[in-house]
Amino acid sequence: MSKKGNKDSQRSDTLQKVKEFKDNFKKEGDHLVQDVFPAKILELEELYQSMTKSRLADIHVDLNIPCPDPILYTNNVSGDEPAGKKRKFENDDHNDVSGTKVMVLPNGPAPCNKKLVVIAEKLKPLIRDLMDHTNMLKMWIAFLIPKIEDGNNFGVSVQEETMGEARQVETEAASYLDQVSRYFISRAKLISKVAKYPHIDDYRQAVRELDEKEYVSLRLICCEVRNHYASLHDLVLKNIDKIKKPRSANADSLIY
């Protein structure tokens, strides 16, 4: 066989594989809307109902950073205190502004909030699934868009509107993952403040407030992910005829 024949054969095989890929994608997209979306809605609803507001009281954990006993300075009445050491005591108020240099925590590492970690680990795969499913939904609709022609484009506009909604959901889902990672960074900074200033209860309270805020945020994320699945499922089913067949056969016959 000539080089041209081999090239034509390879091109034909490639086009056939691409066609099979598109056909499989169309089947998977239909399964996604009909079966996967409803299952995800029910799964997220069950998780959301388990995250009740009453659990806020049990969301706190011990920081494992003890508050040390205060250091008491006594006046030297004998007068034999070295001048250098006396000046150091006199300037202690000024030196304490920088806090305590933390070399090691006496009771071991300060743990993260395991209760929130468990919830976050349940939510993150669901968020990633939402991103993958919205991307698949966009491609499914893109393969259903007919060739560009004049007139009878209402069905195409419905397809483009649905794709735009899926694109927006995908962007919001990515921001949810970023929000989870920012919580751990913020909490770590507060924990370092507690270690450096163990006598200041406001920093400890700030950690508790941050944990409560994150629990509410995770609960809201769960609700939003569920709502995104429900709204996309509802939007596609209501317009399924226009999405699958954007141009009706009757309208096509009128054009010609």
Image (cartoon, rainbow, N blue to C red):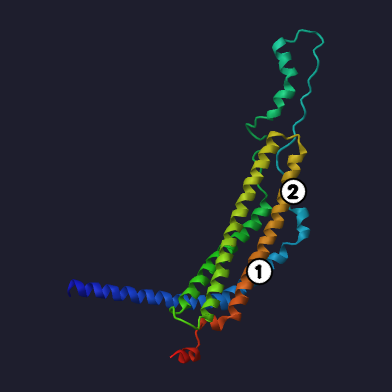
Front residue of 84/102: it is 84
Which-is-in-front pick, marks 1 and 2?
Answer: 1
Task: Tell me the quadrant of the picture where the N terminus can be found.
Answer: bottom left
Q: Is residue 172 above or below residue 12?
A: above
Callout 1, which amino acid? Answer: Asn
Residue 166 picture location, percent across and down? 56, 69
Local secondary structure at mark 1: helix
The residue lying furthest to the right in this view is: 77
Local secondary structure at mark 2: helix
Residue 43 picture location, percent across and down? 64, 69
Query: Residue at (68%, 49%) from the top-left corner?
Result: 113
| Mark carried by residue 254 | none
Using the rendered view, name the quadrant where residue 226 is placed.
bottom right
| Mark carried by residue 227 | 1
Query: Residue at (53%, 77%) from the top-left corner?
Result: 157
Q: Is residue 70 left or right of residue 178?
A: right
Using the rendered view, name the quadrant where residue 58 is placed.
bottom right
| Mark carried by residue 209 | 2
Using the rendered view, name the quadrant where residue 70 is placed.
top right
Alpha carbon separation for disc pair 1 and 2: 27 Å
Callout 2, which amino acid? Answer: Glu
Labels 1 and 2: the sequence-earlier one: 2
Residue 211 picture location, percent across and down? 71, 50
